[in-house]
Image (tube, rainbow, N blue to C red):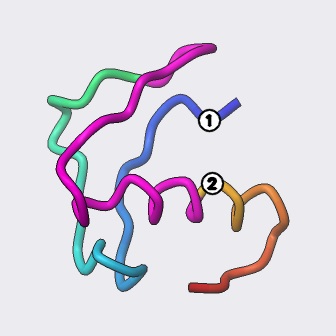
Amino acid sequence: MITKINKIKDFGVFKNFKNSGTIPEFKKFNLIYGWNYSGKTMLSRVFRCLEKGEIRQ
């Protein structure tokens, strides 16, 4: 199970994301919310790429 993301580079809206330690670890169930075009769908694509073992934007 993925518990945290340290960094995402050059993937959709995430050009250079680094976790500064202020984001809590993922649990069994998580709620991700934000404004339109803030990266929610792109984050789900990151998880899908990790699941499938391939990188596609």
Q: Residue at x 29, y 76 (%)?
A: 13
Q: Nearer the viewer, residue 29 or 34?
A: 34
Kindly indicate the quadrant of the structure image that contains residue 23: top left
Q: Secondary structure at mark 1?
A: loop
Magenta-colored span: 26-46
Q: Secondary structure at mark 2?
A: helix
Classed neighbour count for the residue bearing mark 1: other residues with Cα under 10 Å, few (<14), some (14–19), many (≥20):
few
In front: mark 1 or mark 2? 2
- Residue 18: where, in percent of width, then height? 23, 57
Residue lying furthest right: 52
- Residue 45: where, in percent of width, then height? 59, 64
Q: Which mark is residue 2?
A: 1
Residue lying furthest front: 36
Q: Nearer the viewer, residue 30 or 20?
A: 30
Residue type of the residue flagged with mark 2: Phe
Task: Judge whether residue 23 is colored magenta.
Answer: no
Q: Which mark is residue 26?
A: none
Picture mark count: 2
Q: Disc 1, disc 2: CB below 8 Å?
A: yes
Is 19 situated left or right of 47 in this image?
left
Q: Residue at x 57, y 15 (%)?
A: 29
Residue identified by numbered label 2: 47
Is 38 situated left or right of 7 in this image?
left
**41 is higher (above) or lower (below) than 15:** above
Between the residue at mark 1 and the residue at mark 2, the CA separation in whole angstroms equals 9 Å
Residue type of the residue flagged with mark 1: Ile
